[in-house]
Image (cartoon, rainbow, N blue to C red):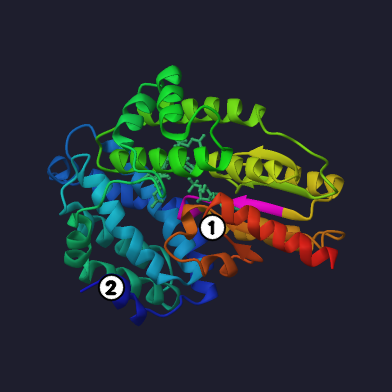
C-alpha cells in the first residue's frame, strides 16, 4: 500500500503535545542515541564506522518530526521516509535498523512525556512502524535519472565535468548545447538545474561523495557569476526584490537563480544567499522596501523556521504591502505547504518565479 494514501488516517497532533515534543527534542535525541548505542547488534543494524551518521540521522529525524507535527502534514512524512531508507541503506544501514530506531523514539517519548501528551504522538510512531514494509518497498522503487526539460543533451557528460569542477570543459559543453552566447534562463534551467538534480540523485545512492557535491556546487556558482556579469541591465523602474534562503538553509543556488532572472527582467535585487539572520533580513526589508521577498527552502525540516520568519515579517510595521513568494524543493512534493507556512505564492522554478513577481508588480501598478 502507498503510505502517502494511508497517511490520511492520521490526525493532527494537538498543540500542547507538539510543543512538549518540540521542547524535548534534545533529550529525546540523546535517549535514542543511548538506546541504540547500547545494543550489542548495533554493527549489524548500521554497518561499520557509521556511528556519526546514525547520530546525524537521529538529529535530523527529531527536526523533521517537529516540522511534520507543526505542519500537521503526514503526507510529507510518508513521502520523506522512503528517501531516508534509501539514503541510509545506500550507506550500509540495514533495513532492520528503522523499526528498531522508531521503537526507540516511541519508548523515549513514552518515558519523557506525560501520557496525555505522548499518546497522539505515539499513534504516529505506531503507524510508521506498522508501515515499515511499505516504506521499504517504496525505497526500492527505481528512480529515473534527471533530464533537461528542453534539450536532448547527454547530461551524464555535464555531470562528469561538474563533479571534477572542470570550468573550461563545462563552458565548452554549455556552448555546444546552447551556442556561443547562452541565454541566462536557458543555461540555468535547462543545464545547471537538471545537472545538480542528477548529482543529488547520485549522492542519494551514495555514488557521489559530499566532497564531489561541494566541488560541483562551487563550479556552478563560478559559472553563474560569469553569466551574471553579462546581464544587460536597463533602468529598474522601482521594482525591488530581496531573495534568500530560509533560516538554517544551506542550499542557495535556487535563490540566486530567482534573483538573477529577476535582475535580467529589470528588477533591483538584493541577494542574501544562505541562512540569513532573521534580524538582518528584517532590517534590510525596512531599509530597502522591496515589493517582493523570495524565500527558498529545500530541506523539509527547515519549513518551520521559514514559517516563523514569514510570521515575523508579517508582524513588522511598515511591511504590510510586501508580497512573499516561496519556492525550492521542500514544496516540490506538496505545493500546499507554501500557503501552510504563510506565503502569498509559490512557483516551481526560477522562470515562473520571475513571472509571478512581474504579475504582482503589474497588480500594484494598476
Ligand atoms: C548542491 C547541494 C547541496 C550543497 C548546497 C550548496 C549551495 N551553495 O547551495 C550542500 C553540500 C551545502 C548541501 C547540503 C545538504 N544537502 Co543538499 N543538495 C544539493 C543538490 C545536489 C543540488 C541543489 C541545487 O542547487 N539544485 C539546483 C537548484 C537550482 O535547484 P532548486 O534549489 O530546486 O531551485 C529551483 C527551484 O526549486 C526554484 N526555486 C528555488 N528557490 C526558489 C525560491 C522561490 C521564491 C521560488 C519561487 C522558486 C525557487 O527555482 C530553481 C530553478 O528553477 C541537491 C540535489 C537536488 N535535487 O537539487 C541536494 C539535496 C537538496 N540535498 C539534500 C540533503 C539531504 C542535504 C543535507 C541535509 C545533507 C548533505 N547532502 O550533506 C545538507 C543540508 C544542509 C542544510 N542545512 O541546508 C537532499 C534533500 C532531500 C530531502 N528529501 O530533503 C537533496 C535533494 C539530495 C538528494 N537527492 O537526496 N546540498
Q: Is residue 172 magenta-colored?
A: no
Q: Mark 1 — residue?
A: 303
**At 52% from the left edge and 66% from the top edge, which residue is drawn?**
337
- Above or below residue 331? Residue 146 is above
Category of crowding for the residue at label 2, using alpha-carbon neighbours closer than 10 angstroms: few (below 14), some (14–19), many (at least 20) = some
Q: Regarding mark 1 in the picture, which secondary structure is present there?
A: helix
Q: Give whichever of 172, 363 is nearer the camera.
A: 172
Q: Is residue 126 left or right of residue 136?
A: right
SS for dot 2: helix
Q: Nearer the viewer, residue 158 or 82?
A: 158
Which comes before the other along the chain, label 2 or label 1?
2
In this rendering, would 1 be left or right of 171?
A: left
Q: Which quarter shows the N terminus?
A: bottom left
Quadrant housing residue 264: top right
Instruction: Please give the residue where the numbered disc 2 appears in the rendered image.
Output: 127
Question: CB of mark 2 within 8 Å of CB of mark 1?
Answer: no
**Which residues are the magenta region?**
293-301
Q: Nearer the viewer, residue 124 or 251?
A: 251
Amino acid at each position: 500500500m502507498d503510505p502517502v494514501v494511508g497517511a490520511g488516517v492520521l490526525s493532527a497532533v494537538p498543540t500542547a503535545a507538539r510543543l512538549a515534543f518540540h521542547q524535548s527534542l534534545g533529550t529525546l535525541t540523546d535517549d535514542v542515541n543511548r538506546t541504540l548505542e547500547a545494543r550489542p547488534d548495533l554493527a549489524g543494524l548500521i554497518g561499520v564506522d557509521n556511528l556519526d551518521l546514525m547520530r546525524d540521522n537521529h538529529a535530523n529525524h527529531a527536526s523533521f518530526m517537529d516540522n511534520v507535527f507543526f505542519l500537521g502534514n503526514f503526507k510529507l512524512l510518508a513521502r520523506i521516509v522512503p528517501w531516508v531508507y534509501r539514503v541510509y541503506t545506500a550507506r550500509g544501514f540495514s533495513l532492520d535498523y528503522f523499526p528498531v530506531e522508531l521503537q526507540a523514539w516511541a519508548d523515549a517519548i513514552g518515558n519523557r512525556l506525560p501520557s496525555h501528551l505522548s499518546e497522539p504522538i505515539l499513534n504516529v510512531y505506531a503507524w510508521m512502524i506498522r508501515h515499515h514494509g511499505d516504506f521499504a518497498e517504496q525505497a526500492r522503487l527505481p528512480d529515473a535519472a534527471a533530464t533537461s526539460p528542453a534539450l536532448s543533451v547527454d547530461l551524464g557528460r555535464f555531470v562528469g565535468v561538474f563533479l571534477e569542477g572542470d570550468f573550461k570543459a563545462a563552458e565548452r559543453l554549455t556552448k555546444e548545447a546552447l551556442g556561443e552566447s547562452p541565454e541566462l534562463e536557458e543555461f540555468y534551467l535547462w543545464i545547471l538545474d537538471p545537472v545538480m538534480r542528477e548529482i543529488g540523485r547520485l549522492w542519494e545512492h551514495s555514488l557521489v561523495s559530499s566532497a564531489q557535491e561541494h566541488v560541483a556546487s562551487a563550479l556552478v556558482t563560478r559559472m553563474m557569476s560569469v553569466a551574471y556579469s553579462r546581464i544587460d541591465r536597463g533602468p529598474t523602474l522601482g521594482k525591488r526584490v530581496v531573495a534568500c534562503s530560509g533560516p538554517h538553509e544551506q542550499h542557495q543556488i535556487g535563490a540566486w537563480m530567482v534573483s538573477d532572472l529577476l535582475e535580467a527582467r529589470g528588477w533591483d535585487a538584493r541577494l542574501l544567499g544562505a541562512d540569513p539572520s532573521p534580524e538582518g533580513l528584517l532590517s534590510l526589508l525596512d531599509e530597502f522596501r522591496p515589493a517582493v521577498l523570495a524565500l527558498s527552502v529545500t530541506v523539509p525540516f527547515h519549513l518551520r523556521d521559514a514559517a516563523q520568519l514569514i510570521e515575523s515579517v508579517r508582524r513588522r510595521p511598515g511591511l504590510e504591502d510586501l508580497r512573499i513568494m516561496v519556492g525550492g524543493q521542500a514544496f516540490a512534493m506538496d505545493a500546499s505547504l507554501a500557503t501552510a507556512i504563510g506565503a502569498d505564492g509559490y512557483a516551481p522554478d526560477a522562470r515562473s518565479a520571475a513571472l509571478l513577481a512581474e504579475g504582482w508588480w503589474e497588480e500594484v501598478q494598476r
